[in-house]
Image (cartoon, rainbow, N blue to C red):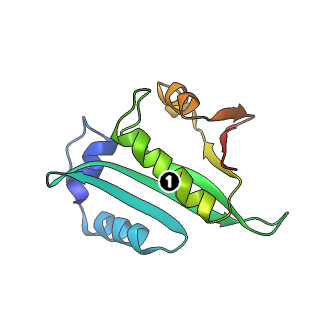
Amino acid sequence: DFPALTTLLHPQAPCAATREQIRHWRRLASDPRLDFYIAEQEGTVRGMVLICYIRELSRPGWRAVLDVVAPLSAEEGIGRALLDFGKERARRRGCHHLLVYESEHEQDGRCAALAQAGFHRLGDVLSCGLQ
């Protein structure tokens, strides 16, 4: 499924998988500190979501960080369903917020789609309350 996953992230780039890349994705899929889910429809990969969990130092519990959701658009669809599923998983783990750390190259339509999904800007991060 590696070619299908990379196509979701970079639709314009050709996929030439190396063994290291495949190992990296397999490690992600098996890491208990991550929620990594893939949506499949009629045998074709249609979307994915990856949420990382980090221990909080200031209080007991976990901090949930959305790393990847694809596809992500402002409309309802598989990406939005995966995002909602990820929020529920983070809520069940006891997280109060789902955070997105942004980099400058991610400013395109992602912020609008995340805002429609309940995320609000807090400084350099976007946050969505889960409680």
- The residue that mark 1 highlights is 86
Please tell me whether residue 55 is drawn above or below residue 127 in the rendered image: below
Of helix, strand and loop, which one carries label 1?
A: helix
Quadrant where the N terminus is found in the figure: bottom left
**Residue 12 seen in this snapshot:** yes
Q: Position of residue 103 (x, y in %)?
A: 58, 37
Q: Is residue 83 left or right of residue 12?
A: right
Please tell me whether residue 72 is drawn above or below residue 99 in the rendered image: above
Q: Position of residue 116 (x, y in %)?
A: 54, 28
Q: Is residue 123 left or right of residue 88?
A: right
Label 1: how many residues lie within 10 Å, few (<14), some (14-19) or many (20+)? many
Front one among 105 and 122: 122
Q: Quadrant of residue 72?
A: top left
Q: Please identify the residue farthest to the right as the structure is shown.
A: 58
Task: Give me the residue at 62% from left, 44% from top.
Answer: 101
Q: Position of residue 33 (x, y in %)?
A: 55, 70
Q: Is residue 115 left or right of residue 24?
A: right
**Residue 70 seen in this snapshot:** no
Task: Give me the residue at 41% from left, 30% from top.
Answer: 73
Q: Position of residue 51 (x, y in %)?
A: 52, 57
Please tell me whether residue 3 is drawn above or below residue 62 in the rendered image: above
Please tell me whether residue 103 is drawn above or below residue 93 in the rendered image: above
Task: Give me the residue at 24% from left, 59% from top.
Answer: 2
Front one among 111 and 74: 74
Q: Quadrant of residue 76?
A: top left
Count the marks: how many? 1
Identify which amino acid the numbered label 1 is placed on. Answer: Gly
Task: Give me the residue at 20% from left, 54% from top.
Answer: 16
Q: Quadrant of residue 55?
A: bottom right
